[in-house]
Amino acid sequence: MEDLGLDKNFWKNKRVLVTGNTGFMGSWLFLWLNILGAKVLGYSLNKSFDKNLFSCFPRDLKSKTIFGDIRDYEKLKKTINNFKPEFIFHLAAQPYVSEGFLDPIYTYQVNINGTLNILDILKNKNFCKFILNVTSDKCYFNNDSRKNVFNEEDRICGDDPYSNSKSCSELINHTFIKTIYSKKNIRLCSARSGNVIGGGDRGINRIFPDLMSYYFDNKKLYIRSLHSTRPWQYILDLIRAYLHLAKKSSLTNKKIFEGPWNFSSDLNNHKSVFDMINFLDKKYKTIKYKKMKNTIKEKNYLHISNQKVKTILNFKYKYNFEEMLSESLDWFKFQSLNSKKELFNFSIEKIETYYHK
Ligand SMILES: NC(=O)c1ccc[n+]([C@@H]2O[C@H](COP(=O)([O-])OP(=O)(O)OC[C@H]3O[C@@H](n4cnc5c(N)ncnc54)[C@H](O)[C@@H]3O)[C@@H](O)[C@H]2O)c1
């Protein structure tokens, strides 16, 4: 079996905490780790997983979740102390740019205190070997030039509240690596992930979920910004990359795995919203949309480099832009026609097919 962090021998019985496991990305990670035989515990809010992947999990899988707020230091501490995770994937966040404008205080509190709480709770503990703090590609200082391709050395400072809260989370990571964790045997990394496409994303004001709601929930489609380009990537490419990083960095004392990682597809897959609509229109069904004035102050251009992931992790993405859209469309199509139980089995098949591609 290729060494991509996925072999069952490695993950079997590993104790893994996934915060945000009821969300879009967290639920795929949670499912995959369960398939690999890890002992997984989730920590999330008890809301807003209607119609995503988590909603189709059987009861016994769902029950491996502690419902709590990431800002609740005592509850989180108790959870971590009882479970003693060797690996932590921290995804719980207020993850929406538009919500950041509506409620900046909440956004900063969740995205900063969540990170801070986890790192502080673990500062005197020895059971944890690896923490991945999932931030965002939006954490960079972006002057919206078409030519920018950010790498991990570039300046951190997002403009809008969501992006900036993720920049703050990055700074907290940096401080813990350089000082409080400097002598600890724990690999602390951050994931500056590009925009993710996949089955079960029900995100607010995100283009792909909006397109899926248009197709399958008869919702009207409003487009804010047709020519925005983003560093898209397929959900399973990203989860495989997280697992690969976790395995590699936990097996070595080398500091090269510590710190920030950009995750995105190659530059030729960083396409526009227009390209996405065009592809789906031809591939599946005609799309009629209304252009709306963009009241959300967001960037037109965002490109990150995946050179570090390629060279140091020796990691290759499997799916291009068209494949990630087709695969994800497939999931939503299946959901619209089948029961939750069938969707759960179909999602496991998706992981297996992806893995063997
Ligand atoms: N989806 C993307 O394209 C993308 C891109 C880059 C980074 N990210 C980051 O990845 C992570 C997951 O994003 P997603 O798209 O799966 O979001 P999502 O909204 O689908 O899931 C968010 C998860 O966080 C949990 N959560 C939210 N607030 C919480 C709180 N106060 N306490 C405890 N749990 C809380 C929710 O319960 C849910 O499980 C986030 O950190 C997000 O910023 C996402």
Image (tube, rainbow, N blue to C red):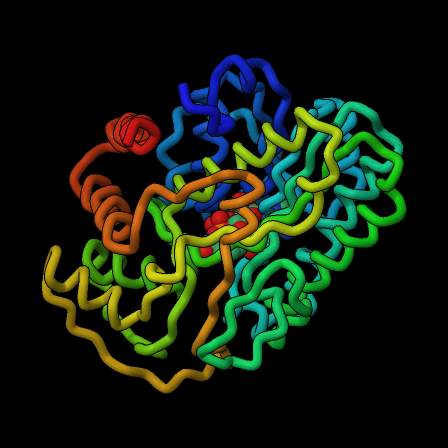
Q: Residue placed at 19% from the left, 35% from the top? A: 338
Q: Residue placed at 84% from the left, 49% from the top? A: 178
Residue 107, position as x, y percentages in the image:
64, 63
- Can I make out residue 62 in this image? no
On screen, residue 99 above or below 313: below
On screen, residue 227 above or below 55: below
For the N terminus, the quadrant is top left
- Can I make out residue 322 in this image? yes
Q: As drawn, is 309 to the left or to the right of 35? A: right
Q: Nearer the viewer, residue 199 or 179?
A: 179
Residue 171, position as x, y percentages in the image:
75, 59
Residue 137, position as x, y percentages in the image:
55, 61
On screen, residue 298 above or below 38: below
Q: As drawn, is 61 to the left or to the right of 275? A: right
Asked where in the image residue 108 lies, by quadrant, the reply is bottom right
Q: Nearer the viewer, residue 133 or 292?
A: 133
Q: Residue placed at 78% from the left, 46% from the top? A: 117
Q: Residue placed at 25% from the left, 44% from the top? A: 327
Asked where in the image residue 312 lies, by quadrant, the reply is top right
Q: As drawn, is 52 to the left or to the right of 219? A: right
Residue furthest front as drawn = 311
Asked where in the image residue 253 lies, by quadrant, the reply is top right
